[in-house]
Image (spheres, rainbow, N blue to C red):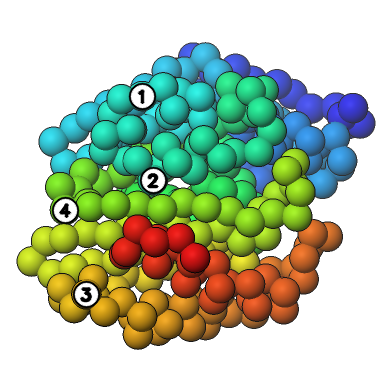
Amino acid sequence: MIGHYFDFHQPTELDEVGALLAAFREDASVLGGGTMLVPSMSANLVCPGHVISLSALRLDEIVLGDTHLHIGAMTTYAQLLASRFVARHAPLLAAMAAQVTGGASIRNQGTLGGAASFANPSSDAPGCLAALEAEFELRSSQGVRHVAAQEFFIDAFCTARRADEFLVGIRVPRDATLVACEYQKYKASASSWPIVTVACSLHRGEQISVRLAVGAAGRRPAYRRFESDEQVLLAPDEFIEHAAMSARDLVGEGWSDELADADYRRAVVPGVVKRHLRILLTGTKT
C-alpha cells in the first residue's frame, strides 16, 4: 500500500508529458508498467508528489526501419516475445525477454523502457541493451536527444535521463553480420533477481567481432566489443580466457545486495563468461 498522497497525471500527448516534467522535475516520477515504481512507492523508497502515466500514449509500437529496430518505451516483454521483427533482427532481446522472472503478470505488464529507466543493477534489461549497442530516445519540452547505452547507464539506479526528460523509445541497430547470440542469467532461486547476467553475440563481417556484456555483477553493465580474425573460431581458448578476465575487470568494485555481495558476484563472472563464450564460438556446452 502506498502511504503518501500524490497527484496522478495521464497525459494524452507527448508534449503534455514534457510540460509536466518541466514543471515538476525531481518531484515527478514517470509510470510505465508499474512493476518497478509501484513497489518502490509502497516501500517508501521513492515518494513523488506527482506520478505521470504514459499509458494513454502509443509508445508500445515495434517498427522496423532501414537501419534500426525501433521499440517504444511502453513495449512489454510479452510484446517483444510476440514480435517477428524482434525474433528476426534482435534475437538476443527475445532471449532476454523469455527469461524475465515473474511469470505472465510481469511479462504482460513490465515494459522494456521502464526496466531500462529504473536501471536496477540486477535487472535483465541493462546488460542485454548494452550488448545490443542500443540507443535511447529521450524527449523533453526542449526537444529530443539520443543517448548510446554506454552513456545511458551511469550508476546503480541512475541513468543519463534528466529530470525534465522521459524515455520515448529504444533503437536497436539492424546488423546483417550477426551469426549467433547467447543470453543467460544466474540467480539464487527461480523467483529471485539475477546475481550475474551474460549477453554475448558473434558477428562476421570484414573481421570477426564478439560483443560481451555482463549485468548484475556491477553497478552498471560491463560491456566490451572484441575484434579478431577467423583464428578465434579455430582456436578460441586463449580468447575466451582473455575475455573472461577482461569482463571481471570491467565489473569494477561490484554490486552488493541481499542476494549476494560484490566479491561473490565478481568471482562468478569469469566462469559464466567462459561457459557462454564457448557455447557462442563452438556450440559446445561445458
The residue closer to the viewer here, 13 or 43, is 43
The residue where tag 3 is placed is 234
Position of residue 62 measured from the top left corner of the image (x, y, whole percent): 34, 26
The residue where tag 1 is placed is 83
The residue where tag 4 is placed is 177
Judged left or right of residue 89, residue 229 is left
Q: Earlier in the sequence, mark 4 or mark 3?
A: 4
| Quadrant hosting residue 48 | top right
The residue closer to the viewer here, 168 or 149, is 149
Could you give the CA–CA distance between mark 4 and mark 1, rounded to whole angstroms? 21 Å
Residue 109 showing in the rendered view: no
The amino acid at mark 3 is: Leu
Position of residue 150 measured from the top left corner of the image (x, y, whole percent): 41, 63
Secondary-structure class at tag 4: loop
Could you give the CA–CA distance between mark 2 and mark 1, rounded to whole angstroms? 13 Å
The amino acid at mark 2 is: Leu
Residue at image x 35%, y 41%?
91
Could you give the CA–CA distance between mark 1 and mark 3, rounded to whole angstroms? 35 Å
The residue where tag 2 is placed is 92
Residue at image x 15%, y 47%?
176
Q: Tags 4 and 3 in contact by the CB under 8 Å rule?
A: no
Q: Residues within 10 Å of mark 4 (few under 14, many from 20)?
A: some
Q: Residues within 10 Å of mark 3 (few under 14, many from 20)?
A: few
